[in-house]
């Protein structure tokens, strides 16, 4: 798997995730909580309760990739809610650099 390729789709889980979870548990969370297949070529991002850590998981065929990002100053600016936020790869990078993720009625947006 080439982690530098742009993924088809990127999803951010809107509720906090236990950061002890590994690849298989994160994939199971995607399947059980969102009725989606984590092996669909998308990247799924999960934010810790303290908003200082993000784990991203992606599958390609029989290979899996897990990225772990930690904020050493401040936190990732997300307002927790429910569901999955779909963003493009460019907006994910903006989020990882500190842009706020907000819920408005019926949708999510990154500022």
Image (spheres, grey):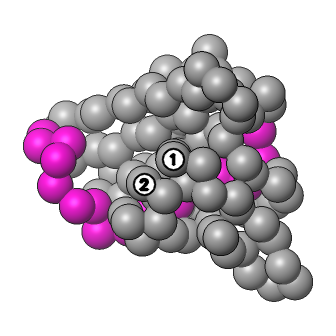
Q: Main secondary structure of the magenta part?
A: loop
- Disc 1 secondary structure class: loop
- Residue occupying image coordinates x 81% and y 84%: 106
Task: Say which quarter of the image contains residue 12.
Answer: bottom right
- Residue 29 seen anywhere in this rendered image of the structure: no
Q: Are marks 1 and 2 in contact (CB under 8 Å)?
A: yes
Image disc number at residue 67 = none
Q: Viewed as shown, does residue 70 lie left or right of 50?
A: left
| 12 within the magenta span | yes
Residues packed near mark 2 inside 10 Å, few (<14), some (14 to 19) or many (20 plus): few
Residue labelled with disc 1: 97
- Disc 2 secondary structure class: helix
In magenta, the rendered stretch is 1-17
Residues packed near mark 1 inside 10 Å, few (<14), some (14 to 19) or many (20 plus): few
- Residue occupying image coordinates x 84% and y 79%: 104
Q: How far apart are the alpha carbons under marks 1 and 2?
A: 6 Å
Q: Does 23 sit above or below residue 93? A: above
- Closer to the camera, 70 or 49? 70
- Residue occupying image coordinates x 60% and y 49%: 98
Quarter of the figure that contains the C terminus:
bottom right
Residue 37 in percent (x, y) is at 45, 56
Residue labelled with disc 2: 93
Quarter of the figure that contains the N terminus:
top left
Q: Nearer the viewer, mark 1 or mark 2?
A: 1
Q: Viewed as shown, does residue 50 lie left or right of 40?
A: right
| 68 within the magenta span | no
């Amino acid at each position: 798997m080439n982690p530098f390729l742009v993924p088809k789709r990127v999803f951010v889980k809107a509720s906090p995730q236990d950061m002890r979870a590994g690849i298989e548990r994160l994939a199971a969370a995607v399947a059980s909580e969102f009725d989606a297949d984590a092996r669909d070529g998308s990247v799924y991002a999960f934010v810790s309760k303290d908003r200082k850590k993000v784990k991203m998981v992606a599958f390609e065929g029989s290979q899996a990739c897990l990225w772990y990002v930690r904020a050493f100053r401040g936190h990732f600016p997300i307002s927790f809610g429910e569901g999955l936020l779909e963003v493009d790869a460019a907006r994910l990078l903006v989020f990882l650099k500190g842009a706020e993720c907000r819920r408005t009625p019926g949708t999510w947006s990154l500022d």
